[in-house]
Image (cartoon, helix red, strand yellow):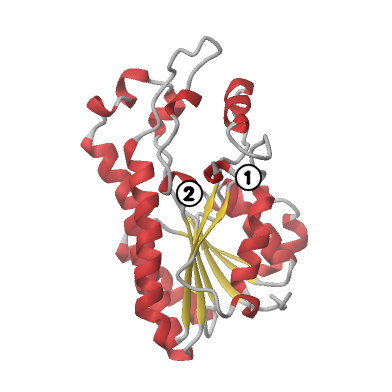
């Protein structure tokens, strides 16, 4: 596989579950990583093997759904780096209602327009803005790779039955905005791949399945039963596809949505 050494890669949401795993592995492979995240800078030290990769990391605290903040960060980034090779849009909001386990509030009939708009802004508008602001800088070099993180829930509807307890009583409903925005990410990816293909910029999306992250045993069991591999994904298992799309080994791949879901959507 082609070398990642000294490639300049922006990762939004780089301190999140998937983002931090990508940061760790890309930096270990020699890439220079620019992290954009809302979390405090101290969270960067929680990235695995931080002491070994810290010289390859640059961090900017930024709300990637706010254009003014992105424009300020853009000046700082290009004051330090002459170009960006890869943009990975991994920042996303997964509705807080799920964390509260509030059944009534999670019902579609009661889902608030404020939560809907917040999700659209965080999960879709942020990608639009980052591609517009950072992706457009790739035009000068007539090359670059943009990777948008979508979800299997952008392909198929959530199975609400897995959000139940042992007695099959509904705990909460997966919200409508997450699926809608992730489907939008896939559509936007295809649009941008078509639009920028003539200038050599490749744009692809990755649709991961559920990633195991301290969920309760009942949820893990129910989710796993719907996959062909009978388990949830681990964060590092997304890395192989991301690495491929970061290099020239994927030079003829664009406009694709690559599914990494253990077979969830195969049946």
Q: Name which residue lies at 54% across and 81% down.
A: 81
- Tell me where residue 235 appears, x and y as whole percent: 65, 47
The mark found on residue 37 in the picture is none
Q: Compared to 133, does 197 lie above or below?
A: below
- Tell me where residue 152 appears, x and y as whole percent: 48, 46
108 or 42, which lies in front? 108
Q: Residues within 10 Å of mark 2 (few under 14, many from 20)?
A: many
Q: Is residue 42 visible?
A: no
Which mark is nearer the camera, 1 or 2? 1
Q: On the picture, is 68 further left or further right than 233? A: left
Q: On the picture, is 181 further left or further right than 247? A: left
Cα separation, mark 1 vs mark 2, equals 13 Å
Q: On the picture, is 3 further left or further right than 92? A: right
Q: Name which residue lies at 43% across and 90% down.
A: 140
Q: Is residue 186 visible?
A: yes
159 or 87, which lies in front? 159
- Tell me where residue 267 appears, x and y as whole percent: 54, 41
Quarter of the image with the N terminus is bottom right
> Which residue is denoted by mark 2 in the rendering?
151
- Is there CB contact under 8 Å for labels 1 and 2? no
SS state under label 2: loop
Q: Earlier in the sequence, mark 1 or mark 2?
A: 2
Q: Residues within 10 Å of mark 1 (few under 14, many from 20)?
A: some
- Tell me where residue 64 appears, x and y as whole percent: 39, 59
Q: Name which residue lies at 58% across and 80% down.
A: 251
SS state under label 1: loop
> Which residue is denoted by mark 1 in the rendering?
262
Q: Residue furthest top?
A: 167
Number of labelled discs?
Answer: 2
Q: Name which residue lies at 40% across and 87% down.
A: 198
Q: Compared to 180, does 98 lie above or below?
A: above
């Amino acid at each position: 596989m082609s070398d990642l050494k000294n490639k300049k890669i922006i990762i939004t949401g780089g301190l999140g579950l998937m983002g931090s795993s990508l940061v760790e592995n890309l930096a270990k492979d020699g890439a220079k990583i620019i992290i954009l995240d809302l979390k405090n800078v101290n969270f960067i030290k929680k990235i695995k093997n931080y002491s070994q990769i810290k010289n390859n990391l640059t961090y900017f605290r930024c709300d990637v759904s706010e254009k003014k903040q992105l424009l300020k960060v853009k000046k700082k980034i290009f004051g330090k780096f002459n170009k960006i090779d890869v943009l990975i849009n991994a920042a996303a909001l997964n509705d807080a209602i799920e964390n509260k386990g509030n059944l009534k509030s999670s019902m579609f009939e009661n889902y608030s327009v404020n939560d809907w708009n917040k999700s659209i802004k965080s999960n879709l508008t942020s990608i639009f803005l980052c591609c517009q602001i950072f992706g457009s800088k790739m035009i000068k070099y007539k090359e670059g790779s943009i990777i948008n993180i979508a979800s299997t829930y952008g392909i198929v509807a959530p199975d609400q039955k897995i959000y139940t307890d042992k007695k099959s009583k509904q705990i909460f409903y997966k919200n409508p905005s997450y699926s809608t925005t992730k489907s939008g990410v896939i559509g936007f990816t295809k649009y941008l791949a078509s639009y920028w293909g003539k200038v050599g910029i490749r744009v692809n999306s990755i649709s991961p399945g559920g990633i195991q992250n301290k969920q309760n045993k009942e949820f893990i069991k129910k989710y796993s039963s719907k996959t062909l591999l009978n388990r949830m994904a681990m964060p590092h298992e997304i890395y192989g596809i991301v690495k491929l799309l970061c290099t020239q080994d994927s030079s003829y791949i664009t406009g694709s949505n690559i599914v990494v879901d253990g077979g969830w959507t195969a049946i």
